[in-house]
Amino acid sequence: MDLIRYFEKKQIDNIDRPRLRAGDVVRVETKIQEGEKARLQTFEGTVLGVRGSGPSRTFTVRREIGKFGVERIFPLFSPLITNIEITRRQKVRRAKLNYLREVGKRRVKEDELSMQRYVKEEGDKKRLAEEAVRREEEEKIKAEAEVKKQVEAVKEQPENETQIEKDAPPKE
């Protein structure tokens, strides 16, 4: 058994990795081979927890992308990991932050509700604007009808006055 521990220790001695804790916000750069080309891909998120010991130690990183939460489990001493940068350390009271999964769901639910409220408000605004335009058109039609009535009344009025003058006895 000691011989196995000895070889494990030898494997991880030449690899320098930071001490990760739950709550750390990290940026992990991994080497990705696509055909003949190799590139570096970064994954930034919060460390949910670290598990295992020796060369088989792994850590879970979670990040929120829009409505979705993405989690990746990285082997700490993998040769594909080129760099682990701790961008921020947060004080947490737990070794595993699995409750963040539920927080993300709750946040998504709240976002959906607020979006529904926003859509409803926008719909109400649109409906109110359409009603205002319709009312203005109705008022314009009523005003035009009143103007027509007044014009007709004015046209009829001089005819009545001329008839009254004809019927009236001549003035001296």
Image (spheres, rainbow, N blue to C red):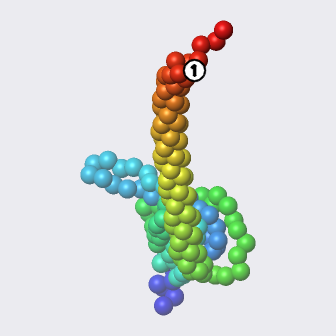
Front residue of this view, candidates 133 and 84: 133
Picture layout, residue 118 above or below residue 139: below
Residue located beneath label 1 in the image: 168
Residue 23 can be seen in this image = yes
Point 47% across, 84% down: residue:
4
Point 70% across, 68% down: residue:
90
Say which element carries label 1.
Answer: loop
Front residue of this view, candidates 78 and 66: 66
Residue 25 position, x and y percent, is 62, 64
Residue 104 position, x and y percent, is 55, 72
Point 58% across, 67% down: residue:
46
Front residue of this view, candidates 85 and 153: 153
Picture layout, residue 41 above or below residue 110: above
Asked where in the image residue 93 lies, by quadrant, the reply is: bottom right
Residue 62 position, x and y percent, is 52, 69
Point 73% across, 72% down: residue:
91
Residue 158 can be seen in this image = no
State the count of labels: 1
Is 35 situated left or right of 141 in this image? left
Is 61 situated left or right of 36 in this image? right
Residue 158 position, x and y percent, is 53, 21
Q: Seen from this angle, which residue lies furthest bottom?
A: 1
Please state which amino acid type lies under the numbered disc 1.
Ala
Front residue of this view, candidates 53 and 70: 70
Q: Residues within 10 Å of mark 1 (few under 14, many from 20)?
A: few
Q: Seen from this angle, which residue lies furthest top?
A: 172
The quadrant in which the C terminus is found is top right
